[in-house]
Amino acid sequence: MKTAVVFDSAGTLLHTYRVAKDIINDSMVEGVETTTLTCSAKGRALVLLYAHSKNIINEPESELLSSYLKFNGITFGVACSCGVVTIGDVSDILYSDEVAKTGDLQTCIRKVWSCCKKLPVVAMNSGVIVNKNIGRIEYAITSGGRPFSGAKKTIQTLQEMDIATYVASGDRTDKLMKMADYLGIPHGNVHGVSTPSIKAQIVKDLKEVYENVIMVGDGVNDIAAMKEADIAILTEQQKGKKPKILVEAADYIINDVSEVIEIAKKSNLQK
């Protein structure tokens, strides 16, 4: 194989519905782009919680989220951050916050489930945004997604063209595996809980194996990987305003994941 295509998941392969609860202002934000929200203030980190939604829902809503996480030994992964936010910083806040309740996260889970329960949901994740500069959990977040209509056919066509397909995403690996099974992407080619720097390293490592590596993403956390790739594709299939810095990092801007096929085909023939 000469060419490999690396996909982000949410917003790229999956049409994703996200909601966040602003815990400080006690308000809901729907259709939020979590990476953009995270990167809009220094000291923030987007944290994935390795807890099943059903288990969270069964907890008393008045219980402190930090107590629930600590008592049940819930671990986490950092998807991205704005500035330097260490694992230690996140851990200190996550397990000691005295404001966020399990009920805040339950509200997000129920909202997403009410919209996605009739769809073939492939990935559903919950987490929080912590802020090192104020030492607390700012937002509770849940997302649910289903594959874009052309995603499965796109992956199959690329593989028939002898083009390798990979996933590098900030989402949880176990959730991504369900999506990979549906789309036909080998488990060994799926990289979960990938921060921007890890995504970039994945692309860099693949360039040692393939003559051409394409990165397909839709958020600011994909910029480093897009810059590292031989070809950077920004997908706008999931609507929403894209930051200028993200647009400028792209060699191609597409409106449907299937458009990757022709770009990859052209690239494969040129190498």
Image (cartoon, rainbow, N blue to C red):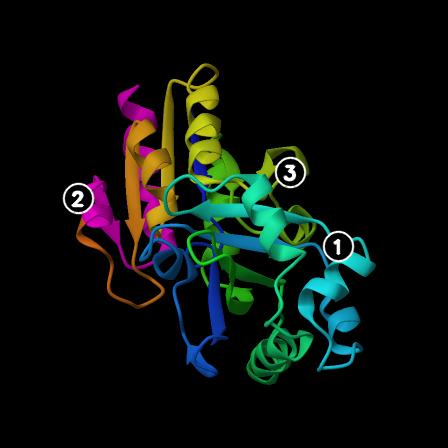
User: SS at mark 1?
Assistant: loop
Q: Measured from the top left, where is residue 24 in percent x and y?
A: 46, 75
Q: Measured from the top left, where is residue 170 in percent x and y?
A: 52, 47
Q: Give me the C-alpha separation between circle 2 and circle 1.
A: 38 Å
What residue span does the magenta drawing correspond to? 245-271
* Relative horizontal placement of residue 12, taking residue 121 as reference (left or right): left
* Relative horizontal placement of residue 91, taking residue 72 as reference (left or right): left
Q: Nearer the viewer, mark 3 or mark 2?
A: 2
Residue at (60% x, 72% y) in the render = 100
Residue 74, label in figure: 1
Residue 264 on the magenta span = yes
Q: Give me the C-alpha separation between circle 3 and circle 2.
A: 31 Å
Residue 186, label in figure: 3
- Residue where numbered disc 2 is placed: 248
Q: Is residue 187 above or below residue 9?
A: above
Residue at (67% x, 56% y) in the render = 95
Q: Amino acid at mark 3?
A: Pro
Asked whether residue 180 appears in the rendered view, the answer is no
Q: What main secondary structure does the magenta stretch of the protein show?
A: helix
Cβ–Cβ below 8 Å for labels 2 and 1?
no
Q: Amino acid at mark 2?
A: Glu
Residue 18 on the magenta span = no
Q: Label 3: how many residues lie within 10 Å, few (<14), some (14-19) or many (20+)? A: some
For marks 3 and 2 on the same chain, the one whose residue lies earlier in the sequence: 3
Cβ–Cβ below 8 Å for labels 3 and 1?
no
Q: Label 1: how many residues lie within 10 Å, few (<14), some (14-19) or many (20+)? A: some
Q: Amino acid at mark 1?
A: Ile
